């Protein structure tokens, strides 16, 4: 699949730069950029050994609570301190990331923001592992509730996203003067992305390169499209995970139910599978 991955990398780079020279429909840009990023990150995660950072069930259950605490903390910082002061401190942190970060510090251009954001997304999907589909389901379910609560029931999420002047979101130039940019949070790419990547590695471990990966990836795409449609219909911010999580889990669940492979999928544990392969290799060498 190296050719496909290479083509996706080229397409992602071209799409990122395209708004500089031509008008790109914002909705199409959001969908294609997010999907290409997930695709690239997933295939980069396929290695002889699983990603080094593996999440446990306990971590997955705790993640939405930690995320909520951080989100609320940022909201309070922006509420009671100068927005410029908070952003200056955070910008100083990103300064250490190099020339692109320097460009971002000096000009705060959306392109520098997106390059950093895409790099974070791809690296996150590549390096993080859920370990098992059970852990993934726990994490996505928790963040499903988290996203709905903070977007629909409080002004916190939208306020932080608009105030936080750092590459925690992708910016897509818009033709609407009143709203020059559309935004997509990095979490809406990375969190579902690591679940989709797990599906790909599960396929590879069974000798089926893109069996369940196609279902999970299609579910992500469908969820993202649904997000864009609803957002444009109501002209209001939407919690993307409200649509993406059911899409990813639902498409994968229907596929494995259809194939009668629910048990092996739920029993799959990436760490144990890797250990078994190492033991088998050692025995062969002996």
Image (cartoon, helix red, strand yellow):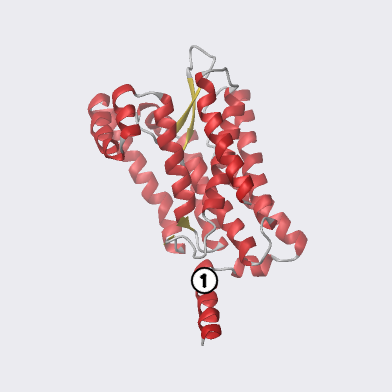
Q: Which residue is mark 1?
A: 274
How far across and how far down the image is residue 58, in percent?
A: 43, 63
Disc 1 is placed on an element classified as helix
Nearest the viewer among 263 and 284 is 284
Disc 1 crowd, CA 10 A, few/some/many (<14, 14-19, 20+): some
Left or right relative to 249: residue 125:
left
Q: Residue at x 60, y 70 (%)?
A: 267
How far across and how far down the image is residue 151, in percent?
A: 47, 35
How far across and how far down the image is residue 38, in percent?
A: 55, 44
Q: Residue furthest bottom?
A: 286
Q: Which quarter of the figure has residue 256?
A: bottom right
Q: Which quarter of the figure has residue 211?
A: bottom right
Q: Residue at x 53, y 79 (%)?
A: 281
Q: In this orientation, does residue 76 appear?
A: yes
How far across and how far down the image is residue 181, in percent?
A: 48, 21
Q: Residue at x 45, y 54 (%)?
A: 127
Q: Is residue 51 above or below residue 189?
A: below
């Amino acid at each position: 699949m190296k050719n496909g991955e290479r083509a996706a990398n080229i397409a992602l780079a071209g799409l990122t730069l395209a708004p500089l020279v031509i008008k790109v429909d914002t909705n199409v840009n959001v969908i294609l950029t997010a999907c290409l990023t997930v695709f690239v990150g997933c295939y980069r995660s396929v290695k002889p050994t699983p990603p080094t950072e593996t999440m446990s069930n306990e971590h997955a259950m705790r993640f939405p609570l930690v995320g909520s605490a951080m989100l609320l903390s940022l909201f309070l910082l922006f509420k009671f301190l100068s927005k410029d002061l908070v952003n200056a401190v955070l910008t100083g942190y990103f300064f250490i990331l190099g020339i692109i970060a320097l460009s971002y510090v000096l000009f705060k251009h959306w392109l520098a923001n997106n390059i950093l954001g895409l790099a974070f997304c791809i690296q996150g999907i590549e390096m993080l592992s859920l370990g098992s589909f059970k852990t993934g389901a726990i994490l996505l379910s928790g963040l499903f509730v988290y996203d709905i609560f903070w977007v629909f029931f409080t002004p916190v999420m939208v306020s932080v996203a608009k105030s936080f002047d750092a590459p925690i979101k992708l910016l897509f130039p818009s033709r609407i003067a009143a709203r020059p940019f559309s935004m997509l949070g990095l979490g809406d790419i990375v969190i579902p992305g690591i679940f989709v990547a797990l599906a790909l590695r599960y396929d590879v471990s069974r000798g089926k390169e893109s069996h369940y990966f196609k279902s999970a990836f299609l579910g992500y795409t469908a969820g993202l499209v649904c997000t864009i449609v609803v957002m444009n219909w109501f002209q209001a911010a939407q919690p993307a995970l409200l649509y993406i999580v059911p899409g990813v889990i639902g498409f994968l669940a229907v596929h494995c139910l259809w194939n009668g492979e629910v048990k092996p999928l739920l029993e799959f544990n990436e760490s144990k599978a890797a250990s078994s392969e190492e033991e088998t290799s050692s025995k062969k060498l002996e």
